[in-house]
Image (cartoon, rainbow, N blue to C red):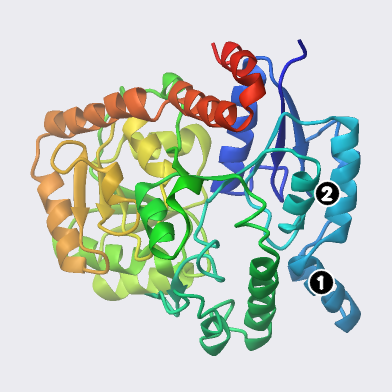
Amino acid sequence: MDAPRLLAINNYFYRRGGAEAVFFDHMALFAEIGWDVVPFAMQHDGNEPSAWSDYFISEIEYGNQHGALTKAMHAAKVIYSLEAQRKLSRLIEAAPPTIAHAHNVYHHLSPAIFSTLKAASVPVVMTAHDLKLGCPAYKMLSRGVVCEKCKGGRVHNVILNRCVKDSFAVSGIVFVETMVHRLLGLYRDKVDRFVVPSRFYREKLIEWGWPAEKLVYIPNFVDASHLRTDWAERDHFVYAGRLAPEKGIATLIRAAAVSRQTLVIAGTGPEEAALRALARDTGADVSFAGYVSGEDLHGLIGGAKALVLPSEWYENAPISILEAYALGRPVIGSAIGGIPEMIKEGETGYAAEAGSPESLAHAMLTVASLSAADRAAMGMRGREWVLAEFSATRYRQRMLDLYAALVSSDIGDMRRHGT
């Protein structure tokens, strides 16, 4: 019998962010066990090479728009991409999939593709990397504050609050997009199951009216096997990620000033200048490392007293927490979104009140008061947790079980390919 075929779908075909990392790692895990993996994405200069790239849709980059006609055409594609439907139909004909798994499709591929997949009787799974299924603006965040005003179908609030890029026009397009997608049932009726990486997101979506049976909790994973733990600890805490308002970095800088702890911030983003000014004004011992990746980032985290994740919005299931554990380091995180369920209080790290410099400073002082051996022990308990619950093997098996449940006639063959 031919190997099962996974149709892997995402807007971008290069490692652009967290969703793309999961997308590529997911494909690799299934290719390893003999599945035929076929991608569907958007053409882009940064794409990885693919034998299937001729089927990718034409590039849409909204930052490069010029002229009213171009803007109107792109707005139409945001809502419903006929091109994506046409090209996906050709791809399905050339390589009929056993199952399709989508990641981020908003604004480029569009959920129009789910109608095409349903018409072809292809079972469809989608990973909810954000809260778009409930919130038109993805994050349940408005003007820097957690917002749930659209609950109960009151999605007009996305316009009233100009939730997307603080723009009435852009928020209006997103409102129309949301209404069309809901009227056509493109998510609710065309997607068979949603993979939700955090229990918090699953419960939040159920609270917002999504049927529990369609939401499957499958946590993210990290391959800890190639990550060292024999780092020499240095005298700093570390934040690694985008420098954006909802990440709570201003609160972290104030906490570093209050606790008199050394902080290294790795990353870039729109808030960098303001954060540098805040560090100067508060007298906090903060250094900005800029963009850091690979072994350099591992060394920065591995040598820290702890990774700090001070988010002030509903984070999903940050892979950075799993990576810190895999490197043998404890974690301090805000008690918001999916972060608390990824911290065993006092065992692998500590949670602090979101948006509170005092609470965060207390957690940092608590970790700093431990011996280096005790901090290392916390980190190793985190690593053991990763190996037991957040490994690549566990992730793949959970996905295989889900796929098999949706493709009942191929259960035996799919399970054999999971061994």
- Image quadrant containing the C terminus: top right
Work out whether residue 41 can be spotted.
no
* Residue found 9% across the figure and 39% down from its top: 370
Q: Does 236 sit left or right of 395 as displayed?
A: left
Task: State the mark number for residue 353.
Answer: none
29 or 6: which is nearer to us? 6
Do the residues bearing badges 1 and 2 touch, measured as CB atoms within 8 Å?
no
Q: Quadrant of the N terminus?
A: top right
CA–CA distance in space, label 1 to label 2: 18 Å
Identify the residue shown where x is 85% and y is 30%. Answer: 95
Can you say whether 24 is above or below 163 in the image? above
Of callouts 1 and 2, the N-terminal one? 2
Give SS at disc 2: loop
Residue 356 in which image quadrant: bottom left
Q: Residue at x 39, y 47 (%)?
A: 198
Tag 2: residue type? Gln
The vertical placement of 405 against 17, above or below, is above
Residue 393 percent coordinates (x, y): 47, 21
Nearer to us in this view, 342 or 309: 342
Quarter location, residue 184: bottom right
Q: Which mark is residue 76?
A: 1
Crowd band around label 1 with a 10 angstrom C-alpha radius: few (<14), some (14–19), many (20+): some
Residue type at mark 1? Ala
Query: Which residue was labeled with disc 2?
Result: 43
**Circle nearer the viewer, 1 or 2:** 1
Check the image and report above or below for 364 versus 247: above
- Residue 110's place in the image compared with 160, above or below, is above
Instruction: Judge by depth and name the residue closer to the eye, 132 or 255.
Output: 132
Q: Position of residue 133 (x, y in %)?
A: 54, 61
Residue 155, position in %: x, y?
54, 79
Classify mark 1: helix, strand or loop: helix
Q: Position of residue 397 (x, y in %)?
A: 49, 23
